[in-house]
Every structure is written in structure tokens, then in C-alpha cells.
Image (tube, rainbow, N blue to C red):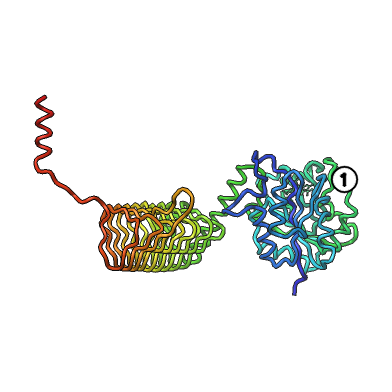
Amino acid sequence: MSNPRAVIILAAGHGSRMKSKLPKVLHEVGGRSMFDWLVGLARDVGAHRIAAIVGTQTPLVKEHAVEVLGGGGVAVQEPQLGTGHATGFARDILSDFAGDVLVVFADSPLITSETIERVFAALHDGFSVAVLGFEPENPGAYGRLVEDENGNLTRIVEAKDATDAELAIGLCNSGVVAASRDLLFSLLDEVTNDNANGEYYLTDIIGLAVARGLKAKAVRASSDEVLGVNSRSELAMAEHIFQQRARAKALADGVSLLAPDSVYFNFDTVLEADVVVEPNVVFGSGVTVKSGARIRAFSHLEGARIDEDVVIGPYARIRPGTRVKGGAKVGNFVEVKKSTIREGAKISHLSYIGDADVGANANIGAGTITCNYDGFDKHHTQIGDGAFIGSNSSLVAPVQIGDGAFIGSGSVITKNVSADALTVARTRQRQIDNWAHEFRNKKQNL
Ligand code: UD1
Ligand code: CA
């Protein structure tokens, strides 16, 4: 049995190196803000309580944190006097919490719950404080983890305060720290700002714990996992690592990716086993694809459920609110928005289908457009089971096409069509014999 858990997310920093109007921790990786990745991680490890520490320069972060966690889970740190100072602002939020507390930075979106379990396990194994360490290629400005000959962690020294010998240590601090609530806040009480930055360092609690005769432990993680995002280039790196993970997971789950590196996932993409994804496909948020479906090359899907044995694309655009049911086909250069395409229906070429319900086994000819928008409101188009819509027809919504009805090519349909009727809504073809011949003669004899 593990102790109850709480997670403190430090998000008070400005993130100025992003050069963005959007606060750093609201930038997205895999379509999910970095802040939300940390909230997701906290929930994945079963946190009973989550506290976010935000700043005043970034009101959007506060607004977002309050929306996600409720006002009771958010504290404002002002001024910002360091990571130890920031962590102290969670004291009130966790005043009635007893258990283990994990501190994380909101700009490290790639940490996995398996790794966090190992950090909590160190507390369970008798260490009073656990820190997540890693060995980067270039330790640079990271805090260094100092271990004794038994492999116990004795203190963390910030790069600016380190001796040359300490700077030579390869093991660095990721920023993730865990301790029991009571110990964490009691150690923070002793932290001073007597250092090169004049800041209250969270990292000082290790040395303070060891001075009390307590044991601390550095748990190791890969550099990829603890990547902190400070710049656009690190954001791109984080996105790359996320995409690689998502591709590997899909393959392991039994999905065929014909060119994995060219398929882009969202954090919530669900692909069942025996889905086939051809090259250059992009999954936006909220897509589920059921077994046996094939997503052909160069398709873009968002907010859609694709059922068994459906074929999408190539070059299809599937927009939010779309459900494509079993065995249906949405072909090249077709855009579908907020529509249900029922079993076995075919929309094979060059169409826009929006705010529509397309009946089972209906055939939608090339170039069919649902005219769903009048400049003010969106209107619905209903197409019955087995209906046949001739090529290049415009269906001006709101309009209903009955089951089995047949629409002549090039029609502009503005009124409802009865089941099994033929409707042709275009001018009748007229022929003037020999007209072209006479026209040419007249022009050439001028
Ligand atoms: C920190 C660690 C360092 C570690 C590195 C990993 C300390 C003293 N140092 O250094 O050992 O190697 O992270 O990236 O902890 N924050 C606040 N309020 C503050 C200051 C910071 O909320 O007053 C937040 C920031 O928004 C950020 C995080 O804490 O998310 C880390 O702060 P930062 O100033 O970037 O710490 P580093 O100097 O990088
Ligand atoms: Ca940093």
C-alpha cells in the first residue's frame, strides 16, 4: 500500500525564451498543453491532490490552472524568489493533506508515470527525499547531484555555486523531487537565499535532510524524458520525442504504419489493432479509428470516429463531429464536417459534406456540395438510405432527400425530395442544329 499522494506543479516562470505572447507552459506537445501533461501525469500516478503555483505576469496560466484544478488548487507566487520559495506556496493548499508530495516543473511534459512510480518507490524503500536525476550530454547549467561512496544522494549544488570538481559531475537534477508533506515543508523552512542567485532553492532541502541524519536517493531517468522546454527548439524536440513514442505505441498495439515517421499523432489518438495508416497522415485531437479501417495517404482527421473497415482518403479531410460507420468510403479531396456517414455509403471524390446525415449505402457523386451555411446559420442535410446523388449537385440546406431517391447530375436541390423519386433541378438541354457551323462562317467571312 502506498501513501496518499499529492503533486505540486511549479508554473510561475515567464518563459521569455519562447518569444511568445502565449505563456510557455500553455504551448502544446502532441496537441496538449505542457501544463496539462503534468496534470495528466499527476492523475496517472493517482494523486489525491494537485497544487499549481502560478505567477502574476501570466494571467492566462492562472486562468487555465483554475479551470483545470479549481481555485482551491492554485496559488500565486509573487514575487518569484526561487523554486524553494515557489514550493512553499503549496503549504496552504496541502494544509490538510498527509502523505507523499512530488514537486515537478510545468515545462517538462515527457516524464512518464512509470518513472514517477520509481521516485515514490524510493520513499517507500526508506529514503526520506528522492530526486529524479539524469545524465545529459552537456550538463551545462543544470544542478549537479552529489552522491557519497554508497550511492546515497548527499546534496544538490547549482551550477553557479559549484566548484570545478562538482561541475565535473555528470548526474544532473531534473527538478523532480519527492518527500512526505511534513518533511518537505519543515525542510523548506530552513532554506535560505545565501547563494549566487540570491534565490530560495528547492534543491537545498537534500543537504538539509542529510544534515538531519535522513537518507536521500537519486533515481535515474533518460535525458529524453526529463527534457525541459525553454525555447522553440526544445519545444520542437519535445514534439519529436512525443511523436516517436506515439508511433512506437501504435505499432506495438498492432497498427500498421507504412511510413511511421510521416504519421503525426495527437495525445488522445486511439487506433485499434489492424488499422492501416498510409504515409503522411495527420491525426488532430479526438480521433478514434476502429479495427480494419484504412487511412490512406495524405489525409487529415480531427474530432472523428472512423468505424470498422472504413476507407478514408487518399487526400481526405475529416473535420470535428464526424462519424463514418462500418464499410463506408470517403475518397480523395472530400471534406466532411459534423456529419454521420452511415454503413456502406460512398463519397468517393471531390465533395464537401457538412452538417449532414448520409444514409446507409447512399452514393454521393463527384463534386456534390452540401450548401450548409447562409452566412448566418448552419443548416442540416438529410440523405436517405440508398439515395443516389448525381455528380456536381448542390444540396441547399435545410433539405431532405428520401430513401432511394435519385438526383440528376448538376442539380441544385432546394426542396425536399420524396423517397424513390427522380429529381432533376437544372435547365433542360436544348439543341440548335447547325448553329456552330453558321457562327464560324459568319466570323471567318467578315
Ligand atoms: C532548476 C533546478 C536545477 C535543475 C533544473 C532542471 C533549482 C534551484 N534548480 O534550475 O537544479 O537542474 O531546474 O531544469 O531548483 N519557478 C517558479 N517560481 C520561482 C522560480 C522558478 O515557479 O520563483 C518555476 C519555473 O517556472 C520553472 C521551474 O520552477 O518551471 C524551474 O525554475 P528555473 O528558474 O528554470 O530553474 P533552473 O535555474 O533551471
Ligand atoms: Ca529552467
* Of residues 41 and 420, the one drawn nearer to the viewer in this rendering: 420
Residue 176, picture quadrant: bottom right
Percent x, y for residue 313? Answer: 38, 56
- Quarter of the C terminus within the rendering: top left
Mark yes or no: residue 186 visible: yes
- Quarter of the N terminus within the rendering: bottom right
* Of residues 216 and 416, the one drawn nearer to the viewer in this rendering: 416
Q: From this viewpoint, which residue is outermost toward the front?
A: 415
Specify the amino acid type for callout 1: Asn
- The residue under the point 66% across, 63% down is 113
Percent x, y for residue 215? Answer: 83, 62
- The residue under the point 37% across, 59% down is 330
Whether residue 164 sits left or right of residue 111 in the image: it is: right
Give the residue number, with chain letter if any, for mark 1: 193
Count of numbered circles in the view = 1
Residue 115, picture quadrant: bottom right
Mark yes or no: residue 171 visible: no
Is the C-beta of the residue carrying label 1 under 8 Å from the nearest atom of ligand 1? Answer: no
Percent x, y for residue 116? Answer: 70, 62
Percent x, y for residue 297? Answer: 39, 54
Judged from the image, the secondary structure of the residue bearing numbered disc 1 is loop
Q: How many other residues sit within 10 Å of disc 1, few (<14), some (14-19) or many (≥20)?
A: some
- The residue under the point 30% across, 52% down is 392
Q: From this viewpoint, which residue is outermost toward the top?
A: 446
* Of residues 43 and 377, the one drawn nearer to the viewer in this rendering: 377
- The residue under the point 90% across, 57% down is 211
Q: From this viewpoint, which residue is outermost toward the bottom?
A: 1
